[in-house]
Image: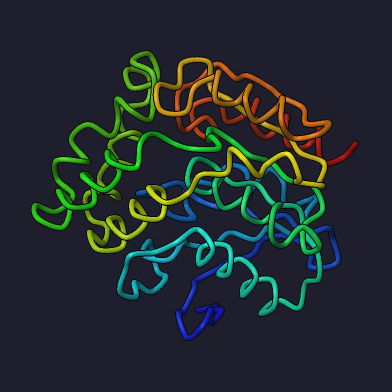
Amino acid sequence: MPIARSNHTPVFYTTDGDPALPGLILSNSLGTDHTMWQAQAKALSPYFHVIRYDARGHGQSDCPPGPYRVAQLGGDVLAVLDALDIERAHFCGISMGGMTAQWMGLHASDRIDKLVIANSAAKIGSSEAWLARAAAVRAGGLDAIADGAGARWFTPAFIAQQPEQVASLVAGLRAGNAEGYASCCEALAEADYRDEIHVIPNATLIIAGHDDPVTTVADATYLQQRIAGARMVVLPASHISNIEAGTAFTQTLVDFLHT
């Protein structure tokens, strides 16, 4: 099993495509793992060396004691790059992964070529709400969070059309590591890049979901207006747009990364 070590924390990763191709790292959302990118890995591996990993506390990566900070999530990305002996790669993160993307642009821009921030915000929600969610998950586990996840992640139409896919993702959340989830909630509580993102130097694409109630089109517009030269695309989807609007999401990535 391929493992990178980030300050002694094992971070799981997997790759698709020829290592001689340009690297593209895909970073998962809160409560999911690297498998959320399966469609993109399959479609993009002829053109990129696609690198997927599990954020700490998720999937097959380790769950060290929390709370976490986004700087640690970014450090895990650097550890994966180092393990693969990759100096620079494109980076695409969704939701929590989009916060990691912003950290990379602010603190490790020399390791990143183009940056894609999907279904995210410079500040996601309120710190108080994230801390309350972390406390609730530590006290009662992930069942209550999982019960409402489908409606947060997808539109009613998609849930009706793809019930098995939605159920599989929700089951993955329910079976996840409660401490890892709570610790990542604490990272999101602390993360606020509203006063910093204007200095991100990388070519940047912002992807939003038209019906996303978590990180809205207004949140995406805020990012686009403050990161110099950033482009923005709105897809017909809710929060997990790379799955709900998978074909359009993948084509949007290709169009941006190949220009």
Residue under the point 34% across and 71% down = 63
- Colouring mode (rainbow / by chain / secondary structure / one colour): rainbow
Q: Quadrant of the C terminus?
A: top right
Q: Position of residue 159 (x, y in %)?
A: 33, 22
Instruction: Give the residue at the far bottom of this rendering.
Output: 8
Question: Does residue 197 appear to the left or right of 228 in the view shown?
Answer: left
- Out of 102 and 177, give the one closest to the viewer: 102
Up-down: is 68 above or below 42?
below
Question: Does residue 220 appear to the left or right of 161 in the view shown?
Answer: right
- Out of 142 and 123, give the one closest to the viewer: 123
Residue under the point 60% across and 26% down = 220
Up-down: is 151 above or below 171?
above
Residue under the point 63% across and 21% down = 221
Instruction: Give the residue at the far front of this rendering.
Output: 195
Instruction: Give the residue at the far right of this rendering.
Output: 259
- State which quadrant residue 196 falls in: top right
Up-down: is 167 above or below 208?
below
Residue 175 visible? The answer is yes
- Out of 136 and 18, give the one closest to the viewer: 136
Q: Position of residue 126 (x, y in %)?
A: 35, 36
- Out of 257 and 21, give the one closest to the viewer: 257
Question: Does residue 230 appear to the left or right of 127 in the view shown?
Answer: right
Residue 38 visible? The answer is no
Q: Position of residue 205 (x, y in %)?
A: 73, 34
Q: Position of residue 163 (x, y in %)?
A: 31, 27
Residue under the point 9% across and 55% down = 139
User: Tag count in the figure?
Assistant: 0
- State which quadrant residue 80 falls in: bottom right
